[in-house]
Each structure stands twice: as C-alpha cells, then as structure tokens.
Image (spheres, coloured by chain):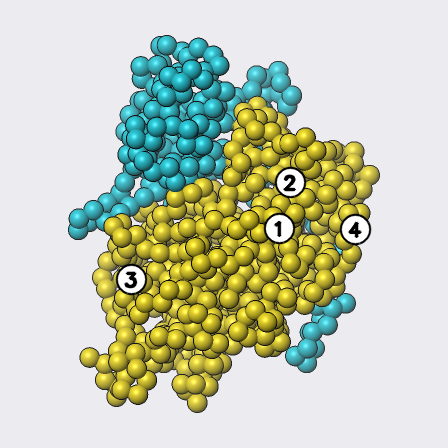
Amino acid sequence: MYDTDAMFDADVIVIGSGGGGAVAAKELGEAGLKVLVLEAGPWYGNKQWANPNNERGGEWSSDYRDLDVGIYKKMFNAYENNMNDVVSGVFRFGPADRRRTPWHRVMRQKGDIWQLSGVGGTTQHYWSQSPRAFPAAVDNIWPISYRELMPYYEKAEATLPVQFAPTTPKEELFYYGAKKAGWSLNPTLNVTTPGYRPNPNAILPTNEHLMDPNYRLEQLSDMEGCTLKGNCVNGCTAGPSVDKIAKRSTLVSYIPLALKTGNVAVRPNSFVTKILTAHDPKEGLRAVGVQFRDTWTGETGELTARTVIMAAGCIESPRLWLNSGLPYNEWVGRGLTNHCFDWVAGVFDEKDLMSIMGLPAVYPYVGHTSGARVDIPGTGIFQVSCLSPGLMSFLTYGFSEAGYDALNPPEPGAPWDIHGRVVGPQLKELMMNYSRTMSMLLLTDDETLYRNRVEVDPLLKDENGPIPVIHYTPSAKTLKKRDQLARYASETLKQAGARKIIRSDTPFGFMLHLESTMRMGYVTDTNCEAYQVGRLFIADNSVHFNGIGGPNPTLTTQALATRTAEKIVTKYFS
Amino acid sequence: MHPATIYSATADPHTFMTFRALVEAIIPGSPVFCVGGAVQAAGAADLCIHEYMIWELDHSLSLMLGFYLTNVPLSCSTARLLDAGAVQFAASGQMRYAPNHLLWGSSPFASLCPDDRIRVLAMLEQLNVDLGTLPPPYRDDGGFLRFMIDFLNRQTMFGNYSEWSAYGTTRLQTPTERRLESFPVSWRQVGYPGVVPGYRALRGNLLTIVRKGGESTIV
C-alpha cells in the first residue's frame, strides 16, 4: 500500500518523450526535480543503443555524452520506404524490433494514423510547422486565454528555435499564386486576419555557406544549419551533433537539453501499461507511479513518483486511463479533433514555370517539406507541402474518401480537374510530371464533437492490454470549411499557372493532428491536472480544448507543457 | 534458394497471382514506344510490388490469442476477398469484358481485365456487396473492408514509387537487412534525384524573427 513517507523513485515520471513529454522533462529537470521518462519505442542516436532495431542495448540513459550523431545519421538514412513504411519503417508506432508487427489500432474507416513511437515521438518525422493557435479559437472558448499562453509560446519558440522558412522555388511559386489570388502578406506570429506568410518552422536557419561553391554539400551537411535537402519527413540529418540537427524534433532539441540538466533519465523500449494510484488521507485519490513492460524482454516493472505526467499522445493517454481503471469520466477519449485534412495539387507546364521563376520545375524535393501557408482564421490553413515520390504519389493519387476519379469524375464547373484516386496509365502519366507538381496540405478548423473518440476494444488485446478503437466523422460545418479551403487552394494554384488541378479528398481518418481527447476543463483543470486523480498531469495534444482553429498543434502542446511544468513546481515542489 | 525467393514461395500461388493482378491494374507497365520511352516500361508487377504487398499484409497485425501474442497474416484472406468480390461482380453482370477463363478457377480477380478489377475494388469500397459472403476478417465488417481497399491502393503506390524495388535480392528480408542494389527504376521514371546532402536553392527569406532580450520582433 501507498505510504506517505515512502521513498519515491523520482519526483516526476513522464510517460512518453514526444512533442510534449520531452518539453516537460527538460523544464522540470531545469527546476531541479528528479525526472524519469518512459518511452515505448527506440532511441536513435545514443551510445547505449548502438543497434536500436536489432539489439536490446542498455536500459537507461541520463548522460548528455551518450548522444552519438554517427548512430543517429546511420539510422536516419532518408530513404522514404526504409524510414516511413507504416508497417516496418524506422518511423512507425511499434516496438524497436522491426521484425515484429506494429502496435495495432482498430479503425473501421479509410485512413491511417501517422504516429511514431521512439524518443522524440512523432516529431521525429513531423514537418516542424510551429505556428501559434489562432487567438479567436482560444479566447472565450478555452478555460485559459491566449494571452496566458503567449509567454510560453515565446519560450518554446526561443528554445527550439522557431524561424520563418526560407524561400525555395516551391515557396516562390506559392507566394506568386497567393498574391495573385488576392491574399496579402501577414507578417505576424499572432494571426487574427487572413493572409499568407512563410511557415514558422522549428528548423535552424539555412547554412550561411550553402550558396558558396567552395563548400562541398557533404561538408555542409556536417555543419550547423539547414541544407534544404528536402527530407524533413524522412529524417533530417543536417548538423554536426545530435543537438545541432537542423530540424528540431524533440529528439534533438528538448531531450539533449533535458539530459544536460543532470536530473533526467530516459528509458526507451518501455511501454507504460498502468497508472498506479493510492488514496491519500488529505489529497484523496492520487497518482503514485506506473507499471511498464520492457518491449524486448516482456518483463514488467514498477516505478513510483510524487507526480506523474501522461504525454503518451491523443490515443494512448486515454487508452492508459481506461486500461488503468481510473475513475469514470464521460469525456475521457471524447472530443477527438484532427483538422479533417485534404490535399490539393497542381501540375505545371515547363514554359509557365520558366516565365514565372526562370526555372523549368517546381522541385518538390527541395527545401523545407512545408515552407509557406495561407492562414484563414475561422476556416483553416492551406500550406505548400511537397514530399518524396512514394509519399507524394499515395497522398495525391491513392488516398481518397471519394473513390476513383475515372468512375466518378468532378461535377462540371468544379475548380479541380481530378477528384479522387487515379490509377492505370493516367497515374503513370501524371507521375511523370512529379517534378512539376506542387501539392498542398489543407488543415480545417475542425468542430469538436463528443461522438469522435478513442475507446478500448472490449475483446481485442495486444501485449500492452486492450487496444484502442478510433472513431472520427467530421461535422457538416467542418466539411463545409474543408470544401472552402479546397476552393481557396485550387484558386491559388490556378493563379500560379497550374494546368491541371487534383483534389484527393483525403480520407477523414488520416490522423496527423490528433487533439483534444482529454480536454482541459472536462478531464483536467487549467493546470492540466486531472480532476479525479491528484498529481496526475497531461502534457500532450490530448489536453487541448479544441483543434486551436486549424494551426499545426505541436507548438501549443510545447507551450502548455512548459506552463504545466511551472504549475507542478509551484503546487507540489515549492 | 535466395531468401526473397523462399519468402514468396511461402505465399500460395493463388494469393500471389491475385496480388500481381491488383498492382498491375493500379500501376501498369507501358509499351516501350509510349511517351517517356523504355524507362517508363516497368509497372508495379515488374517491380514485384505484389510481393511487397503480401509482405506488408503478413507483417501488419498481432493480437493476443489465449496467452500468446500471435501474428495474424492478412494476405491470403485479402486475396480471397478480392476473388469473392470478382465473383459477385461477374454474377451481377457488371463485367465490361469477358474474363480469362484459364485463370477463373484459380483467381477470379486476376481473370478480369484491369479496368474491371478496378471496378471490383470500387464495388467493395462502396459496400455494394453481400458482406455475409466475404471471408473473415472482412465478413460483415464494412468498416474494415473500406479501410483495406483504401490501403491496397495507397500502399501499392507507396511501394512502387519509393525505393523498395531497388532492394533487389534483399527486398523481402527483415527491413534492417535490406541493402540498396541500384537506383530505383520508379525514381528515374518520375525524375526524382534521390537522397542528396543538400540543394543550393536558397532564393531569399521573406520574413525573419529577431530575438533580443526575451522579446521577438519580425523583420
């Protein structure tokens, strides 16, 4: 039984080392607290795990000097199938051992859940867009104000750091089209009016010698600064050391800073299966630790702490709550938002590109994966987003809510020439235009609905317990906004000179920006502490009140995790 | 025997044939005299993407069955799903072209012409099918059926247009054992230069955040 005088293993246990957990660990370590981080997946770039997909390796790492850029670069080889195959890639939601299958989630609809296990979590392959929430989606809606978030945004932006993306050919073309379509430049981080701007990205500025032919490209890729190699999604490797890698996943930003405090230890390959609780005579029900399972040996362990932070992500945090038998709360797992994505692309003629940019192609494989956007508060965002050909082909031509274009072509007068999947000879012909195709990801201001949810299957289990089931059906209001965004994006492509426009009509179940399944104000208080379980905090996207109006959610999670760490110190460790 | 050959030999020939017909319908080969010439000739079947799909489906799911975590291979049941779809498609008189009767007995799906195979996929995706006659785990589970038809399309494209085929003789080994043996044919087809250390492509910075004394301004 829990003993109030017992020695705890740590001040804080953090479950998950992704976009939020790594931030909380660094902030708490800097405050002098002893922190243990448990991560389900592997650690790429640490001497304790020289062959992270083949061997069990060590158990813990707490030393900054364990970081090894040679191992990191060997693992992140930027080949898209090796890196991003959802079944067996370096980046997947599954155990470190790639001979084994990924961890399954039940989804009875078209789609795919792009989440990763591993130190750094999904930020290992995220595109690093780091915009703030739209103020209009927070003020008088969230239980806290946008102003309350601002100092924490500033701190997270300075720490990562965040900088506006440079212009490469695809951004130049995007700005050209956006201006002609009537959007004006919006030079701000606090977006209250529509307009275009470079993406605020968590990517180091471009290497200052990049355009100097006296430096070889191989040499530049071992120096500090982005080399515009276009592989953000397939694993960035530009940089001289792990903590100076250009794209600032938490694996290379917050985790090294956490280790530098000397107060943080991280244990990868450890899947937390249960939150341990106790009844405190003064505080009532409270968290006291966790039970976890070693993914290589199957052995279970327990660790105790004065406080526990759940940062396992929007699916695993509610799953863990439910599988731990914590008190019933009708909002646990409910209110899932996902920005109800769409994907629109344009194919250009060489002569048009020559006249606009003096270049014969869009070069979709050059520069930041996504470098520019149009923000439209109240509707959403469209951002230029170009990928390597395997990923681009399926997102543009193979992934659709609408079925096959040839069997159900667009209505006359529609702003797109193709709507839905393309297969057969037409697909091959379109893919021959890959280097002259510019694509855009659309992020919708998604309405929060109780029916959209994560629950656990009553029958199916994996080695970590009952498995999650995901349900997501957008509202009519969300779909109307999504359609409007597709029209805006098509117009920008048309104004830029695109000769053919493709709307994929992305499946609603394409889960990239999961948010709000453990909502502040319903499951937690404004400090992000669970109402029903004391000393249990949440520091991932799940604690967002809503989908923040459409902007990419990671920075808001990082700002909130910074704030939550401060609240934990004040409330329990002052 | 080479490991890749051993693996594909473990898939039953009907499953192999059905998947080959699937990927061929999605990304066909092209006559060498077409636009783009000989480099465009290879289609997904030439790049063995059917083997990729079988590997993916057989390594994607494990569940606790009794006391043990058990792999649930899905390629065979998925091939049977496509064949069951093809039979219902033919029975409902929707075929545009006569099937290849030599193949009908072993893989009804493969016996259809490519356009009709796509129509079978569309029919299954729209759930215009008697779900009770489908093989498990698709029987009476329209949601999983829709997920799978979508997966078959997008994963065929991802496999084909990624570097997978260039793993050559190591393509079906454990992922950590695969080695690139050539430049991917599909990357040559689309004009992707492959993985490079950088591009000298900076064309300016539209806006910059300047941080001083804990405050940031935009210039």
Tell me what residue is drawn at x 27 percent, y 87 percent. Answer: A281
* Amino acid beneath label 2: Ala
For the residues labelled 1 and 2, say whether their Cβ atoms are less than 8 Å apart: no
**Residue linked to disc 4:** A182
Point out the tag, 1 or 2, that comes first from the N-terminus.
Answer: 2
Tell me which chain the residue with mark 1 is part of.
Answer: A
Tell me which chain the residue with mark 2 is part of.
Answer: A
**Residue linked to disc 3:** A323
Tell me, yes or no, whether dots 4 and 3 are on the same chain. Answer: yes
Left/right placement of residue A509 relative to residue A155 reads: left
Tell me what residue is drawn at x 47 percent, y 12 percent. Answer: B97
* Amino acid beneath label 4: Gly
* Amino acid beneath label 3: Asn
Residue A126 image position (x, y, % from top left): 53, 55
**Residue linked to disc 1:** A481
Residue A441 appears in the picture as rendered: no
**The chain drawn cyan is chain what?**
B
Give the mark toward the camera: 1 or 3.
1
* Farthest right residue in view: A355
Tell me which chain the residue with mark 4 is part of.
Answer: A
